[in-house]
Each structure stands twice: as C-alpha cells, then as structure tokens.
Image: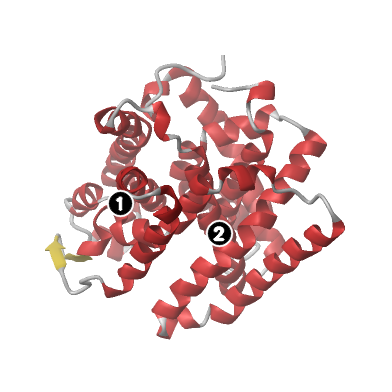
Amino acid sequence: MKTGAERKAWLDYVRFFSIFLVIVFHTPPRLPLFDDAVILNLRVPVFFCISGFLYSAGRFKGFGHYVAHRSRQILVPYTTFFIVFYLLWLVVGRNMAGPEEKSIDVCRPLFEFAFGDPRVVLAPFWYIACLFTMQMIYYWIERLVPRKWVMAVCVVLAGMVYFAPWQWQVDACGHTYRVMRFWNLGNALLFMPFYALGNNCKGWLDRLEFKTPSRTTLLLLLAAASMALMVWAAPLEQWDATVYRLVRIVAGMMVIPSYMCVAKWLAGRYGHRRVIEFVVVSGTVYLGLQNYFINVGRMVLEKFTHVGIMDEQIWLKFALALVVMAAIYPFAWLIDRYIPWFLGKRHSHWK
C-alpha cells in the first residue's frame, strides 16, 4: 500500500467523503429531495469515476491475471460478507422481523447472491457486483477500441440500456429478476461513462484545481447547475425513468470536477490523515456493515431520547451517520488486523 508522499491524498479525501455520503443516504430520516437530488448525485458517479482513475491496464499480464486480481479484491469479500450475514439472517434476523420478512423463502438470498443482487441480507453490495461487471467489460473495450473512441463507446453502451430486452425475466423463490439486473449489467453499462471519464481523463483530473477565481467560479456554478438539474429531475423518476437516468448521467459529469477540486483543496490544507486513509482502504467493510449499524443506532436513539428518527431533521441524519462511521471503525480495524483474508487481502495494511 502506498503511503505518505507516494499516495495521492486528494483521492483519499474524495473516496472518504463518498463513503460518508453513502452512509448519509441510507441513514433516516428519509428526505426524498435531498437524498435523491443531492446525495445520490454526489456519491455513485464519483465512486465509479475514481475507480476508473485508479484502473491501470499495464499492471496485468493478461485477462486471466486481471480476473484473478479483481476476484480476490471483489468476489472474496462479496462472498465472505454474504455468508456471515446470511447465517445471521437465518438464525436471528428472519425470526425477529415482521411477517413480511418471515415469509421470504430461505433460498431466495442464495439466488440473489448468485444473481449478484443480494437485496435481502446485503443490499449495498449491488455496487460491488456492478463494479466487477463494469471492470470485466471495460477491460476489453479499452483494448479493442482506439483510445479516442473509448468514451464514445461507453456513452453508446449506456444509451443501449434503455433499449435492452427488459421483458426477459427469470423467476425464482417467488421473485422476478430482469436479465439486465444479472450482476447489475444494466447499471454497469449505465454508469460506465463515469468509469471511462476517470480512466481516459486521468491527466486532466489530476491537474484540475481551483487555481484562478474565474475557474473556481465556473466550476462551482457548474456544480450548482448540476444540483439544480437533479432537483428538477427528481419527480421524473416515478413517471419517466429514461429521462431521469439520462439527467443523472449529465448531472454527475457536471459535478465531478468541483467535487475533486474541493478534495484537492482539503488535501492541500490538511495533508495525509491516517484515519481517512484507513476508512478508504476499509471501504468494503463500511459498505457491508453500514445498514446494520444504522438500524442499531436508530433503535438506541429512539429508545433513550424518544426522538422520532423519521422526523424530517437533517441535522439528525448527519449526526447519526457520523456516529455510524465512528462505530464501524474498530470493527474494520479488527478485520484488517486479524482476518485480512476476509477482505481478499494477503496481509494487514495497518500493523
């Protein structure tokens, strides 16, 4: 693992705040306009863009080596986390939940796991499955398509999602799946332009900063326009999903430059921070544990403060998210220190 001067501090800040925004998004109270029009626009596009930024074809000897590397880092934690939480669901969660949860067939989570969409026991891991699918497809695009056309091809593939055979379905355990949801193929194609942006524009993104007042103003106005566009489009999700998804792509492209410039400003001001670096390298743990910690925090808060967590209080949303991040930290440290294989690592990064 790179540390100190070798590690780009601004990338850690970008990913740290993206992890925080993921937790904020899943933390009640539910604020539809804020969550869907603001937070949603900031977290997913940036995650995929940074993943593309970090992708380097030259590191791998061939496709087999690439698949082995990505499988170790993605499929191993995907499997280990699922096994743990599936067993917990069978023994505890399914029996403590309401009638609707008890009615779920015990085989359904297994089918969801194989399908790459473990919604019953590990819903946030849709992102991991989506990233794996995206990386497998992008590997060949990057090799078979001339460099200057890679971005255009990814945009065309994203557009093809709207003409995909959504009527093709698979039924299992009382649940219906669209074929385009297999290992999140639809989302992998839809968000691939962000991955291509990060990979094809590394130099530009690396150099981009708030260097002059005019550039700063322009980038911030672009980010504000992005948010306004998402606020306008939020109602479209219910009755015109195609337009809504297209707007999400455009709005995400508009906000990414400012997001990264803010991260660079913070990195320049505060430098490397061990806590931020650790949260970033433990992102999979945060992704897997967040919903369970959020639910525990919600129950504790309601029991001892008698505050209705579903009240529309935005400060409570951020406060609980911060508590959840702090609470997960020691669990992430223990996993990284004593069972790194659980995350597909050969050894701990933090001795």
Circle 2 packing at 10 Å, graded few (<14), some (14-19), many (20+), is many
**204 or 38, which lies in front?**
204
Q: From this viewpoint, which residue is outermost toward the top?
A: 351
Image quadrant in which the C terminus is located: top right
Residue positioned 76% across, 65% down in the render:
218
Q: How many marks?
A: 2
**Quadrant in the picture for the N terminus:** top right
**Where is residue 64 drawn, in percent x and y?**
24, 30
In the image: residue 215, left or right of residue 279? right
Q: Is residue 220 left or right of residue 60?
A: right
Between 143 and 339, the residue placed more toward the observer is: 143
At 32% from the left edge and 36% from the top edge, which residue is drawn?
Answer: 84
Q: Label 1 crowding class (10 Å Cα cut-off): few <14, some 14-19, many 20+?
A: many
* Residue type indicated by callout 2: Phe
Residue 305 visible, this orientation = no
137 or 94: which is nearer to us? 137
Q: Earlier in the sequence, mark 2 or mark 1?
A: 2
Q: Position of residue 301 (x, y in %)?
A: 62, 54
Q: Label 1 belongs to which residue?
A: 118
Look at the image and tell me whether residue 203 can be seen: yes
SS of the residue under disc 1: loop
Q: Is residue 255 above or below residue 294?
A: below
Q: Are marks 2 and 1 in contact (CB under 8 Å)?
A: no
Most distant residue in the right direction: 213
Quick check: 1 above or below 103? above
Name the residue that disc number 2 marks.
25
Q: Position of residue 334 (x, y in %)?
A: 50, 24
In the image, taking residue 9 as reference, residue 63 lies left or right, namely left
Q: Please name the amino acid that badge 1 sits on.
A: Pro
Residue at 82%, 38% in the rendered image: 269
